[in-house]
Image (tube, rainbow, N blue to C red):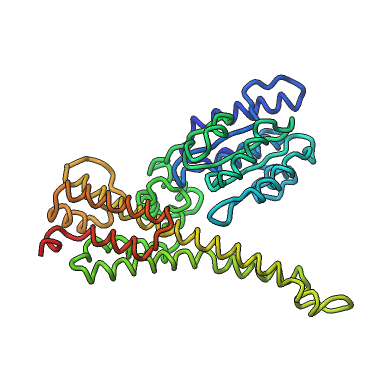
């Protein structure tokens, strides 16, 4: 199971040691090196969830995560009876949900080894929810293990992170990501290295860029923006285009999922069934559940749209970082090497100070969006700040 972690040898060593200690505990030993609460941190795409999943499999598998047994397969697909997999769908994870989770986590393991809670995006916990979770982590049941994932330790309240063992992951190298794409997905070498550079260590995004032509088109459209900002009208148009491209990306990610969830819920409530006690009455009774599902889907769509727009802004920041590298003559790998002519043109037409100002404008836009600013207005302010110095002077 640890083979899915790309370029994380140090973390793998820590997790294997913990799995061996856990096996000692199950066998009646002391098991030094195992703890009941873990926090996996690292930049997007570094493999936080994959690392937590690998440890979960190693704890639940009699062979410490062999990857071939039924237990490992169940962990892989998320169906193991002793694994509670939490994926916050909306913008936040509230206290009501957390209390229910803590109650379920208090139960004894079904199969006798461990009861594990794998919590993706734990940084989405509200303050009240974090305090409720803290109590469970402070006094956990004997065989319950919490695996929390967040971008950085500071994203969780200090009282939680101080009680967790932190596993820090890093963005894997271009070579490591490209090798995975070639060996596991059969991606041609040139495309694999392009996607790995463009994704800047984000393994899943690299896979999407390598395999999905539409994902490459959307990225290309984002990276065409810097050279198009020749006037105020063009800046407003570019902002509208950027928000639209991000919305399309999010819609592509949610449309099929929403449809499948709604169809499944309607089926559960009897739609399309016949016979005594089935039919219109049960479908009408599903109105409340459907409304709740739609609210969750709307919240999830909002989050995914924000995440997609943020990714577009990070692509823009990478473009200007590469411009800065060219301006200083730095011998570093360029994430946007495929836009070399645009990079060199922008580098000639501006100064390093201009480039730093533009990067600051992108980061400020990200902060405004995180504070729930109107996306169109925030992005328009950014594109105006990104305008060519010559165009602004004119």
Give the percent coordinates (x, y) of residue 346: 17, 56
Q: Is residue 382 above or below residue 69?
A: below
Residue situated furthest right in the rendering = 276
Viewer-side residue, 274 vs 376: 376
Give the percent coordinates (x, y) of residue 378: 34, 60
Q: Is residue 193 above or below residue 300?
A: above
Viewer-side residue, 261 vs 215: 261
Residue 4 picture quarter: top right
Give the percent coordinates (x, y) of residue 269: 77, 70
Q: Is residue 295 above or below residue 200?
A: below
Quadrant where the N terminus sits is: top right
Asked if residue 65 shows in the view, the reply is: no
Residue ID at (55%, 52%): 92
Count of numbered circles on the image: 0
Residue situated furthest front in the rendering = 128
In the rendered view, does 299 fall on the left or right side of 103? left
Residue ID at (44%, 53%): 205
Residue 331 picture quarter: top left
Asked if residue 328 shows in the view, the reply is: yes
Quadrant where the C terminus sits is: bottom left
Residue ID at (23%, 58%): 386
In the rendered view, does 296 fall on the left or right side of 231? right
Give the percent coordinates (x, y) of residue 267: 74, 71
């Amino acid at each position: 199971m640890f083979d899915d972690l790309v370029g994380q040898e140090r973390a793998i060593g820590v997790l294997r040691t913990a799995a061996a200690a856990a096996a000692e505990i199950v066998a009646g030993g002391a098991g030094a090196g195992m703890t009941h609460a873990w926090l996996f941190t690292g930049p997007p795409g570094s493999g936080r969830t994959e690392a937590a999943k690998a440890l979960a499999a190693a704890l639940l598998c009699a062979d410490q995560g062999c990857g071939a047994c039924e237990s490992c397969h169940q962990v892989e697909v998320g169906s193991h009876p002793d694994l509670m997999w939490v994926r916050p769908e909306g913008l936040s994870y509230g206290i009501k949900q957390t209390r229910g989770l803590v109650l379920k986590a208090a139960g004894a393991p079904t199969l006798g080894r461990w009861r594990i809670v794998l919590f993706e995006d734990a940084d989405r916990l509200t303050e009240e929810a974090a305090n409720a979770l803290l109590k469970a982590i402070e006094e956990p049941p004997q065989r319950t293990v919490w695996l929390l994932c967040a971008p950085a330790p500071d994203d969780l309240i200090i009282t939680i992170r101080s009680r967790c063992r932190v596993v820090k992951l890093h963005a894997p190298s271009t070579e490591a990501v490209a090798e995975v794409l070639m060996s596991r997905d059969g991606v041609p070498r040139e495309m694999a290295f392009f996607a790995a550079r463009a994704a800047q260590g984000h393994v899943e995004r690299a896979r999407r860029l390598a395999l999905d032509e539409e994902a490459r088109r959307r990225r290309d459209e984002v990276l065409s923006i810097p050279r198009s900002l020749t006037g105020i009208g063009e800046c407003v148009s570019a902002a509208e285009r950027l928000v639209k491209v991000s919305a399309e990306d999010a819609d592509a990610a949610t449309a099929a999922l929403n449809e499948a969830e709604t169809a499944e819920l309607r089926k559960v409530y009897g739609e399309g069934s016949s016979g005594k006690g089935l039919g219109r009455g049960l479908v009408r009774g599903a109105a409340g559940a459907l409304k709740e599902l739609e609210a969750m889907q709307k919240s999830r769509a909002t989050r995914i749209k924000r995440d997609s727009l943020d990714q577009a802004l990070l692509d823009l920041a990478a473009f200007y970082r590469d411009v800065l590298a060219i301006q200083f003559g730095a011998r570093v790998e360029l994430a946007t090497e495929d836009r070399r002519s645009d990079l060199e043109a922008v580098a000639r037409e501006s100064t390093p100070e201009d480039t730093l100002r533009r990067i600051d404008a992108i980061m400020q836009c990200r902060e405004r969006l995180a504070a729930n600013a109107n996306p169109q207005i925030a992005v328009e302010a950014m594109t105006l700040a990104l305008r060519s110095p010559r165009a602004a002077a004119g």
